[in-house]
Amino acid sequence: MRKQRRYKTMRNKNTKLARLIVSFIFIVLFVVSIRSLIDIKTLYNGQEAQAFDLNNINSSSENKINEISNNLNRDLGTSYKKESTNGSFTQKNKFEVEDVAYLESYLSKEIKGEKCDRSYGKKVVYLTFDDGPSVTVTPKILDILKQENVHATFFLVGKAIDDNNNAKNLVKREVAEGHAIANHTYSHNYDYLYPGKKVNLDNFMSEIEKTNQSLRKILGDDFSTRVIRLPGGRMTWNIKDSDGVGKLDKFLHDKDYHEIDWNSLSKDAEGQHKNAEQLKQEVIKSVDGKEKAVILMHDTYGKEETAKALSGIIKYLKDQEYEFKIIR
Ligand SMILES: [Zn+2]
């Protein structure tokens, strides 16, 4: 009897020990896999939307996969380029590119007064220049960005590219110097794009495609951008025709295009003509308290004061500990 009981106790002990070992192995495996997941997420930050799209890919989407891998290579290329010029590879370089789908959703939540889940309390600024390139202002803007070692997103107008051969070289320079290229339609003509103050989908999309073609002639057939800005801004047309813009959004998202407005501006295209100091003050005023600031400026003809104001604006943003990112 006693022997049997002792045997039973020992068997219970062994079972407990085995359970303990199995639980321990399970916990170790769990911790290791979570760590790997975090590492992968950190490495591919900024590519999340593209990665997500892989779930929806079907057999006819081979081009899409190539595009995603090209984008990824380009991002890694940017990091390496920074490493060789700075001599140091920092975490900051890895996160220089912002995913446009994320930023689009951030801005629309901000307008509605909702909190965006991936804010993390980090201050990020996106310098954006519209309506270029111009052979008079764009080179000055590029020089200053280079001096300050920050990057911007250029919302290009197809017509401005095609009208001037030197403008074509500026597009090449923008890409070579690490800036992002976005599509701001071909003509920028409100009457054609928004007849009767309504977005005309056919006209709008044909202009987006026309500008893409102009860009491909300069940058190569594999060039593509997911980033679009409506001439005049979506805010303007939203008020006048919410239906038109809503339809446009769905249409754009189906093609993985994303439309970005701004939440800060220098007012270099609004109201009275302003000098460099006034433009800087407008930026300071509109950026105030923003965790993520998308700043609207222009590098088209006649915007010399914007170029003059730019280094002061960048220095102010650096003092405020903003991180600079491009939108892609
Ligand atoms: Zn514009």
Image: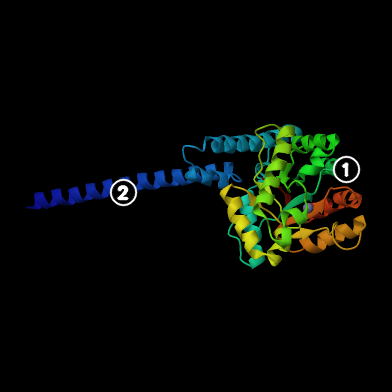
Q: Nearer the viewer, mark 2 or mark 1?
A: 1
> Mark 2 = which residue?
20
Q: Nearer the viewer, residue 295 or 161?
A: 161
**Residue 82, image x and y in percent?**
72, 36
For label 2, the crowd category at 10 Å Cα-Cα, with few meaning under 14, some 14 to 19 and many 20 or more, is: few
Task: Indicate the quadrant where residue 110 lies.
Answer: bottom right
**Three-letter amino acid code at disc 1?**
Lys
What percent of the width, then of the height, locates residue 240?
A: 71, 66
Q: Secondary structure at mark 2?
A: helix
Place residue 116 in its image quadrant.
bottom right
Within 10 Å of the Cα at label 1, are there few (<14), some (14-19), or many (20+) other Cα atoms? some
Confirm or reject: label 1 Cβ below 8 Å from ligand 1: no
Q: The residue tagged with tag 1: helix, strand or loop?
A: helix
Give the quarter of the image for residue 163: top right
- Does residue 150 sit above or below 119 in this rendering? above
Question: Is residue 106 at all visible to an observer of this figure?
Answer: yes
Q: Is residue 17 left or right of residue 324?
A: left
> Label 1: which residue?
140
Q: Is residue 43 above or below residue 287?
A: above
Count how many numbered circles sit on residues in the image.
2
Quadrant of the drawing holding the C terminus = top right
Q: Is residue 120 in view?
A: no
Tell me which residue sits at (40%, 43%) in the image. Answer: 29
At x 84%, y 53%, the residue is 313
Check disc 2 and give the amino acid type. Leu
Colouring style: rainbow
Task: Left or right? Give the position of 218 relative to 306.
Answer: left
Q: CA distance from mark 2 to mark 1?
A: 68 Å
For the point 54% across and 37% down, which residue is it? 65
Between 244 and 219, the residue placed more toward the observer is 244
How far from the left and from the top, in percent, is residue 252?
Answer: 61, 51
State the image coordinates of residue 165 (x, y, percent, origin top left): 84, 34
